[in-house]
Amino acid sequence: MLFILERLSKACANEISTPCFRHRCYAVATALRVAIVGTGPAGFYTASQLLKRLGSSVHIDLIDRLPTPFGLVRSGVAPDHQDTKNVTHQYTSIARDERCSFFGNVTLGRDVSLRELRDMYNAVVLAYGAESDRKLGIPGEEAGNVFSAREFVWWYNGHPDAAHLPVDLKNVQSVAVCGIGNVALDCARVLLKGAERLKKTDLASHALQSLQQAAGTIEEVHLVARRGPVQAACAPKELKELVSDPLLTVHAPHPQMAISPSDEVVLKTTRTKKRIFEIISKAAAITATGIAGTQTLINAVPSSSAPVVTTLLADKAGPETIISRSSVSIEKHEDQGSSSGSSEQAVKKGSGTATASLHFQFYRNPVEIVVDPLTGKAAGLKVERTELRHDERQQGREGEMAVVAVGTGVMDIIPAQLILVSIGYKSLSIGGLPFDPRSGTVPHAAGRVIQTADSSSSGGTAAIRSDGGDGKGLDKSQQAVISSKTPNPSNSRNGLLEEDHGSEYERGLYVCGWLKRGATGIIGTNLIDAEETVKSIVQDWKAGLLPELLITSVKDSVPASSSDVPCNVSSPLVPLEALLESRGVKVVDFEGWSRIDAVEVERGVAEMRVRSKLVDLDTMIGIAVDNNSGYNTVYQ
């Protein structure tokens, strides 16, 4: 990259003193300079596609706020899915390409602003994913032992932000997971497998220790869904893996597996939905109860000081619920007198003795978290039974008419001393970035960020229009044609290029991954996503529509949020590394990450595990930047 910087420096030498540029200048680089913020699957697939399509005509800087790359592959993929994590080998080869540089431990908005990045690069791709959560918005959600699924996953995967999450599993006998997507299934599977079956994986050491302390106490996990089994959002593969555990008893009350005529149509036309329904139905095969009366003891729960919530789960139970200190958990159902009329489906999988149970709780909407007044922690989840109604205003993911869950007024309480909320991840906005808070995404067209009124004065380079102009070589099928790079003064406003109709684009600003489409899809989905975004970048570059480099020259350290630049200029060119050095940022390059990786693998070998992750940032930075092999062993 040095030869590029030298040419830029010479090109800028005669421009830097021009007052109107405020110590900035335009220069044409011999290679396209691209910054990618976020080094998860979306970021690496974007880099891969750029390298593939542009060859030696591109240089890429990969930026991540953590000293470790790979995003959710490292901190999101479950520890018992090591094969999935092998994709990091491909990402490593990309990062080691001479056309790429890795900038770890660099936070956008703190260490460098978006405006500054756009000044230093022809194109900036935002692929930093989703680091927040959607909330239930119900009473008790702030109680102890109530966490988002994201927090819990980060905790057991050793993400530095969640290393000290106050997860207490010692007195947990029953767990409620709100949601039935893949992340919810991961949480349930990790809890039900326990420490013994996960001890050789890369499960974080603190999580392994916590599961060891809770060995034998977690007896049931409830998967709670507002709608029915046909609307379950999980993947068949992950679902089958969970319910096929030979040490699990799977429960699904028969009335909750009932489906409507419209659901039957969906099952006939949608293979995935049909497969999910079949997996749950087979796993919870109907068995005869043949018990007279109204109460059946389904499992014994050891007595403890924590309250045990008695649950009335049957569909014909009354709206009243009972919370008591009891030694048993009771499931109430109506005596049907025959196996065909049983309200309970349960079957032990395999020939072994079941040690825990998994309950599918469909048509149940969480309305309150019951809190133990003595501990301030969760004791149960109050749910309202629902029924489904069609919403003609919306359309489902598979093209069918959307159905919404409507409350019936009948309440139940599910015993739970740990509650995980898995109803969706949410991306966060940064200053100067167009953002839709409802969807948690950046508005875009084929990856090009669309200008909004709120971001029109965000700074950085100008925005461009989607219609009109002479953008030769652009793909009309993308429903957007970028306007000419030469603005017409008669239709220019606030540095934006505009026409009578269409959208305004932020010139040189792109988006990919969850920030682009929302927190959906699998790792491979990001490849398709990246292909579309990179296609837009290449088209804009070939059409001459990307901004030329706008270089800021600095000598002294300045905050990333500063709108001004220092007047004492020592050099006409300041690349990202120099800017970060002037601000005292300890940047972790890929060799630094490799040192962290080597330490983790070495620790893992000593413990007979895949790896033993470091979770303390100071320790990791010390190893990566200062090459301090005497890392702090207090942090596991």
Image: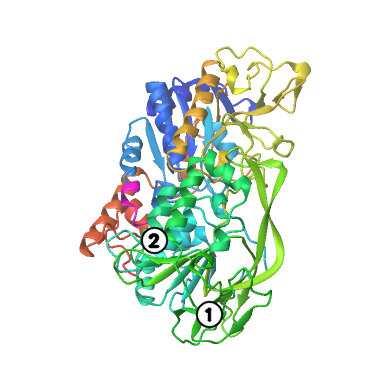
Residue 78 drawn at (x, y percent): 39, 55
Asked whether residue 123 is in view, the answer is yes
Asked whether residue 75 is in view, the answer is no
Q: Is residue 444 above or below residue 303?
A: above
Q: Look at the numbered disc 2 and give the secondary structure of its residue.
A: loop
Left or right of residue 119: residue 52: left
Q: Measuring 66% from the left and 48% from the top, which residue is drawn there?
A: 403
Q: Measuring 37% from the left and 30% from the top, which residue is drawn there?
A: 99
Name which quarter of the figure residue 154 lies in: bottom left
Front-lying residue, 613 or 156: 156
Find disc 1 in the rendering and name its residue: 292
What is the quadrant of the N terminus in the image? Answer: top left
Residue 525 drawn at (x, y percent): 46, 38
Q: Nearer the viewer, mark 1 or mark 2?
A: 1
Residue 112 drawn at (x, y percent): 54, 43
Residue 618 drawn at (x, y percent): 40, 60
Q: Residues within 10 Å of mark 2 (few under 14, many from 20)?
A: many
| Residue that extends furthest to the front in the rendered view of this protein | 338
Q: Is residue 53 above or below residue 114?
A: above
Task: Give whichever of discs 1 and 2 has the lower sequence position.
Answer: 1
Front-lying residue, 342 or 310: 342
Q: Which residues lie in the magenta part? A: 76-85
Task: Residue 434: say if magenta.
Answer: no
Find disc 2 in the rendering and name its residue: 615
Q: Is residue 30 above or below residue 532?
A: above
What is the quadrant of the C terminus in the image? Answer: bottom left
Front-lying residue, 136 or 400: 400
Disc 1 marks a residue whose amino acid type is Ala
Main SS of residues in magenta: loop
Disc 2 marks a residue whose amino acid type is Val
Name which quarter of the figure residue 635 lies in: bottom left
Q: Please report contact status of discs 1 and 2: CB closer than 8 Å, yes or no.
A: no
